Image (tube, coloured by chain):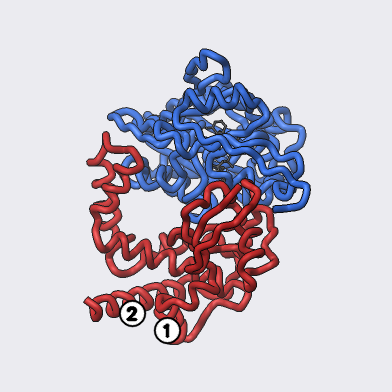
């Protein structure tokens, strides 16, 4: 099949098997993409990419679902200004993930920052998302969910709830960095990003 | 493209009827929901005998959610993360925490409710959770008239946990009761996906009235070898008078283990030990709750 997608800012048009995993495609088109990503669902995390801004295991995404999507590997991400927010937070906290999981944890942090950003900009987004997912019959329920999460301070309050954080990172079995430190890193990176945005506007 | 490898044809039906028709025409094609299970099977790619694919993503009806006072009805393509998002508001904390403990959020964003219930020979946490809640599913049979059939989740599996309707039906909806009993307990030990031969998943809901356990509903799952839910055992739990002595706890736990052994010849010793300890600790908790009034 012909696959048109954007990888690290480059528009690509490839001929691939419809069931070829994205991780295999990336091995062919991105030089630095890790080779050790054949864990068969063992959830090693080596293959994490941002697929349309969401952290995704690329070994579990088939080519046929990728047309028109935007894919960012760690190599592409580290060239963006968003990476510097996280890098700065690593430096300030004085710790960072080990070399084995630096890329995957950094992309997971970025995915979380994008999610926090969306939640804080408008709680209404949750309701709209609910509608677009088809649960228009219960706008009150999704609104209620949004309010409850906000009330519990899990999302959108400018700092991440430790429970949400531990869920996001439950995939990572490497304990090179503690959750409490990750929490500080996420909150700091979020602060830097918000400040930068405020300066620009 | 891998040399000599055929690229599977991908069908993109827009309605449930079209997907049933596609399956009728191509009996070897497989339904594709989130793909997390299919793609994590050994030898998935490259695979010269890869089956064609019927992608369920474009079927809007399968992503709908409907909510009434007594139940939530979710389409089979609702992701586990979406289920937990709604659950934060509609379900008990115990239930929502159990859903949130499935895999990691990266997996939950992609894995669907239908996919979790229809994996061929592995039973995961969601099956156990929804069976405990006595959820019902709607199946569309793969025949010309594609009749719809509602049934309890337990009827989908044999005692070993094998999905009986593989290739014979499309799961379209799941109806989850929200009027739940007073107490819910969901536990999982080990990693169901990565180490299925060691993991144990358990669910129990019940109420307590005076000194009795009322309307218990219990499910125990060993991911690769056993799906256990028994009306007889539920009746045994309902006949218990609280508080329980430690002797009585041991006796009931031994009975459970012997039933699990009968149900699954492949259960590992570790799983049986874990199941018995887990069950004993739950019975002790019930005792404590009762004694605390
Ligand atoms: C890394 C990893 C970790 C995991 N950890 C956990 C865990 O901790 N706990 C847990 O419970 N689970 C866990 N899982 C399993 C996960 O829950 C399942 O892989 C997932 O639910 C399958 O859903 P899916 O939508 O991706 O299904 P798919 O992979 O798309 O499909 C699975 C099967 O169901 C069939 N199917 C799909 N939809 C339908 C339908 N509507 N009607 C009929 N047949 C259908 C498909 O043909 C296929 O055979 C994990 C999975 C992975 C990859
Ligand atoms: S290769 Fe290990 S999770 Fe994708």
In this view, the residue in front, A141 or B180, is A141
Quadrant location of ligand 1?
top right
Q: Which chain is blue?
A: B
What residue is rendered at 57% in x and 24% in y? B169
Q: Position of residue B128 (x, y in %)?
A: 54, 36
Secondary structure at badge 1 equals helix
Q: Which chain is disc 2 placed on? A: A
How many angstroms separate mark 2 from mark 1 (CA)?
9 Å
Query: Where A66 falls versus A26 (above or below)?
Result: above
Residue B167 in picture, x, y percent from top left = 63, 26
- In the picture, measured across the screen, residue A136 lies left or right of residue B213, that is left
Q: Look at the numbered discs 2 and 1 and tell me whether their residues touch, using CB distance below 8 Å.
A: yes
Q: Is residue B236 visible?
A: no
Q: Does residue B254 lie above or below B106 as drawn?
A: above
Q: Which residue is mark 1?
A: A88
Q: Residue, x 67% and y 35% (percent of image)?
A: B121
For the point 47% across and 60% down, the residue is A70
- Report the side of B166 relative to A181 (left or right): right
Decide which of B120, A12 is in the foreground and name it.
A12
* Residue identified by numbered label 2: A192
Left or right of residue B101: residue B43: right
Q: Residue furthest top?
A: B145
Mark 2 secondary-structure assignment: helix
Residue A103 seen anywhere in this rendered image of the structure = yes
Mark 2 crowdedness (10 Å alpha carbons): few <14, some 14-19, many ≥20: some
């Amino acid at each position: 099949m012909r696959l048109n997608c954007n990888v690290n800012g480059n528009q690509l048009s490839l001929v691939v098997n419809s069931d070829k995993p994205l991780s295999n495609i990336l091995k062919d088109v991105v030089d630095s993409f890790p080779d050790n990503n054949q864990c068969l669902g063992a959830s090693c995390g080596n293959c994490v990419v941002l697929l349309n801004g969401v952290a995704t295991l690329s070994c579990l995404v088939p080519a046929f679902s990728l047309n028109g999507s935007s894919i960012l590997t760690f190599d592409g991400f580290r060239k963006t200004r968003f990476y510097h927010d996280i890098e700065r937070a690593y430096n300030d906290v004085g710790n960072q993930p080990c070399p084995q999981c630096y890329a995957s944890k950094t992309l997971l942090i970025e995915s979380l920052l994008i999610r926090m950003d969306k939640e804080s900009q408008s709680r209404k987004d949750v309701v709209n998302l609910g509608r677009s997912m088809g649960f228009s019959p219960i706008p009150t329920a999704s609104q209620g969910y949004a309010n409850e999460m906000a009330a519990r301070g899990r999302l959108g309050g400018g700092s991440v709830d430790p429970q949400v954080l531990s869920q996001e990172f439950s995939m990572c079995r490497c304990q090179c960095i503690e959750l409490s430190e990750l929490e500080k890193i996420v909150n700091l990176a979020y602060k830097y990003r918000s400040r930068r945005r405020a300066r620009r506007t | 493209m891998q040399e000599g490898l055929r690229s599977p044809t991908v069908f993109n039906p827009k309605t449930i009827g079209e997907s049933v028709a596609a399956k009728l025409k191509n009996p070897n094609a497989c339904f594709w929901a989130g793909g997390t299970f299919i793609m994590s099977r050994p030898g998935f790619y490259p695979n010269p005998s890869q089956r064609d694919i019927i992608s369920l993503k474009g079927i809007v009806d399968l992503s709908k959610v409907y909510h009434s006072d007594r139940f939530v009805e979710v389409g089979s393509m609702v992701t586990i993360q979406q289920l937990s998002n709604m659950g934060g508001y509609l379900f008990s904390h115990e239930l929502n925490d159990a859903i949130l403990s499935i895999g990691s959020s990266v997996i939950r964003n992609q894995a669907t409710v239908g996919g979790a219930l229809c994996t061929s020979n592995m039973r995961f946490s969601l099956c156990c959770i929804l069976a405990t809640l006595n959820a019902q599913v709607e199946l569309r049979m793969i025949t010309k008239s594609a009749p719809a059939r509602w049934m309890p989740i337990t009827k989908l599996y044999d005692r070993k946990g094998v999905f009986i309707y593989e290739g014979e039906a499309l799961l379209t909806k799941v109806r989850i009761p929200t009027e739940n009993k007073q107490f819910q307990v969901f536990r999982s030990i080990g990693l169901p996906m990565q180490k299925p031969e060691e993991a144990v998943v358990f669910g129990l809901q019940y109420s307590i009235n005076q000194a009795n356990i009322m309307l218990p509903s219990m499910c125990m799952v060993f991911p690769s070898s056993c799906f256990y839910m028994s009306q007889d055992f539920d009746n045994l739990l309902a006949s218990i008078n609280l508080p329980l002595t430690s002797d009585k706890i041991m006796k009931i736990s031994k009975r459970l283990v012997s039933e699990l052994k009968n149900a699954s010849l492949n259960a590992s010793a570790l799983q049986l030990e874990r199941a018995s300890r887990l069950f004993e600790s739950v019975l002790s908790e019930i005792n404590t709750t009762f004694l605390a009034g």
